[in-house]
Amino acid sequence: MRVAVVGAGWAGLAAAVRATQAGHDVTVFETAGMPGGRARSDDDSDAATDNGQHILLGGYARTLALMREVGVDVERALLRVPLSVTYADGGGFALSRSGPRLLAAAGALAGARGFGIVDKLSAVAMSLAWRLRGFRCPPSMTVDELLRHAPTARVHRRLIEPLCVAALNTPSAEASAEVFLAVMRDSLFGARDASDLLLPQRPLAQLLPLPALAWLRARGADVRLRTRVDALERVEHRWRVGSDDLFDEAILATPAPEAARLTQTLAPAWSATAAALAHEPIVTIALTAPKRPWPAAMLALHSDDTSAPAQFAFKLGEQPADVDRVTLVVSAAGRWLQRGSDAVAAAAVLQYRQAFAIRDDEAVDVASVRADKRATFRCTAGVVRPAMAILPGLRAAADHVAGPYPATLESAVMAGETAAAALGG
């Protein structure tokens, strides 16, 4: 069949690769000059700047398999470290790769630093309760409601809230407990290496977007960058994509607002569901700071709703001899951006200074502040996500379509591959 894929983000590229492997004649349309969508780099150089700090998990089986298939040396491109929630003072926990996952998780919680015996017992009891319930709960339940009678305030604030915000980009008071438990089941309590953190050692474009683009072109796919699709039209049993091209089937691998626009007159109910999704920003702040000891490549930060916006700090790759190059991440940043990007950056810098006891006479220089205002959909309790199937021969493939996981790279790849597998069905 002749297949159109609209969007060259991770979902669109996954759909295009799998459709090409199935023998279809694939054309990819992408508005931007670089592929990658919301996980992209500014250019194709080794020194390219990413649009934010992105991490993968060891359990991203389909993403890792796709990367390998398009020629990426995953072991060199990603730094694999055990999952940890470690603070600058050394507090927190680290998950062992050995032993059964439930015992490893319980052991990590029991051995967590900076927590009292009551905290540890509470955390272990909480994890056992999740397991006994099969990691299930009502769809309308929030993470805070899930935890109402289980953990201590310290476990909630220093353990669950960082994990929730990192995974769902939604505050625990509103976040879907159903989706949170699915993430915990398949990562923290999943396969032995599923919870490992995979930290990019190259620009994002080199992890999948550029290798996939080269792979597609080498196999005859038509990839049209800087080409915006203004309209879709049903022509008998085919689809007109853009001005004059006709395709047997089409896959919309675009953000929800764009998919809603393209389907507004074709499928009003589906379009309304996609348009109703709210989005949550992520702010990424790159800075240089005085050298300090770091207990891990990724650190959790003590955050709050009033003066400390950043939840995590990263220090990756080779570092200069005299300073640290650090990236601070503010997830669920909507409430903070109401004060403006400069205010968010100033508060995060002060937070970092306090975490590492950096004196006033020591310089902390902000290199960049990036605010992705539609980083992910808000994964709130009871959120209704649009289905993959839109109309005969027209499907959506993106991390916002209905599924068990929040907006992640793995969700995007899974959606793209599933949409490609359904072609002709």
Image (tube, helix red, strand yellow):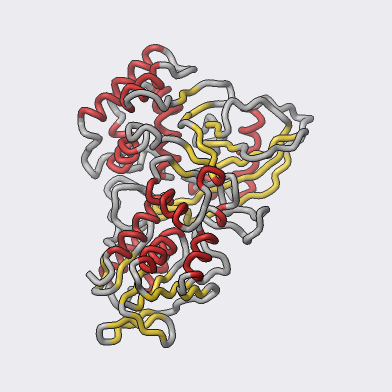
Q: Quadrant of the C terminus?
A: bottom left
Q: Tell me where residue 350 appears, x and y as whole percent.
A: 65, 34
Seen from the viewer's position, the closer of residues 266 and 103 is 103
Front residue of this view, candidates 174 and 262: 262
* 208 relative to 7, above or below: above
- Tell me: 369 left or right of 17: right
Write the residue at 37% across / 32% down.
192
- Compared to residue 53, the image places residue 160 above or below, namely above
In the image, residue 330 above or below residue 238: above
**In the rendered view, does 138 fall on the left or right side of 379?**
left
Q: Residue 47: give x, y in percent of width and height.
A: 68, 53
Among the 4 quarters of the image, the one containing residue 389: bottom left
Quadrant of the drawing holding the N terminus: bottom left
Q: Is residue 361 left or right of residue 325?
A: right
Give the number of marks: 0
Picture coordinates of residue 218, whole percent (x, y) = 50, 69
The answer to whether residue 330 shows anywhere in this view is no
**275 vs 387, nearest the viewer:** 387
Question: Residue drawn 25% across and 87% down?
Answer: 236
Residue 335 lies, in percent from the top left, at 49, 46
Left or right of residue 260: residue 217: right
Q: In this rendered view, identify the residue nearer to me: 320 or 14.
A: 14
Residue shown at the point (47%, 76%) measured from the top left: 222
Residue in the image at 42% along x and 40% along y: 58
Q: Residue furthest top?
A: 117
Q: Is residue 103 visible?
A: yes
